[in-house]
């Protein structure tokens, strides 16, 4: 059974940093497309960052230059380093996995990601 478990969320002041982790188990996640998404109440889930099986990365416009996605295949863990956080980054953050490859992966189509974690909350105060 595939399982994705996020951790690392919390409350931080504007300008601060957090690192989210997503521990994967149950399959060879390193061969998949992995992504971080976020959602606020009343809004659709949006792609924040993604990494494909070749290690290519993509970022949402609003987080580019501030967030970094990475993975440790030996630990089956995906990370999201978030720096220079802003109040508008406040959201529930989810990691997800898909069998998509290449550009299809990096487009971060929410509806094509099959496996999801339970989410971790990030709150950024002004």
Image (tube, grey):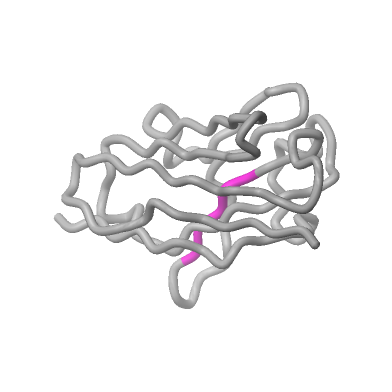
Q: Does the magenta run of residues contain 118?
A: no
Q: Horizontally, is 4 left or right of 111 in the view?
A: left
Rendering coords of residue 117 (x, y %)? 61, 61
Q: Nearer the viewer, residue 75 or 42?
A: 75
| Residue pictured at 62% horizontal, 28% vertical | 57
Say above or below: 45 vs 20. Answer: below
Which quadrant of the figure has residue 114?
Answer: bottom right
Q: Horizontally, is 26 left or right of 124 in the view?
A: right
Rendering coords of residue 41 (x, y %)? 44, 75
The main secondary structure of the magenta stretch is strand
Of all residues, the one furthest to the bottom in this rendering is: 42
| Residue pictured at 18% horizontal, 47% vertical | 14
Rendering coords of residue 119 (x, y %)? 51, 63
Say above or below: 69 vs 45. Answer: above
| Residue pictured at 81% horizontal, 39% vertical | 104
The quarter in which the N terminus is drawn is: bottom right
Question: Magenta residues, as a range?
Answer: 35-39
Q: Does the magenta run of residues contain 36?
A: yes
Q: Horizontally, is 56 left or right of 1 in the view?
A: left
């Amino acid at each position: 059974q595939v399982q994705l478990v996020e951790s690392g969320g919390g409350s931080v002041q504007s300008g601060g940093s957090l690192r989210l982790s997503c521990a994967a188990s149950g399959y060879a996640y390193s061969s998949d497309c992995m992504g971080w998404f976020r959602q606020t109440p009343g809004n659709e889930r949006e792609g924040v960052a993604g990494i494909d099986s070749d290690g290519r990365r993509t970022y949402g416009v609003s987080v580019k230059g501030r967030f970094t996605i990475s993975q440790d295949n030996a630990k089956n863990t995906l990370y999201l380093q978030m720096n220079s956080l802003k109040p508008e980054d406040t959201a529930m953050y989810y990691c997800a996995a898909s069998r998509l490859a290449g550009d299809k992966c990096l487009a971060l189509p929410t509806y094509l990601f099959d496996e999801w974690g339970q989410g971790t909350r990030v709150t950024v105060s002004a």
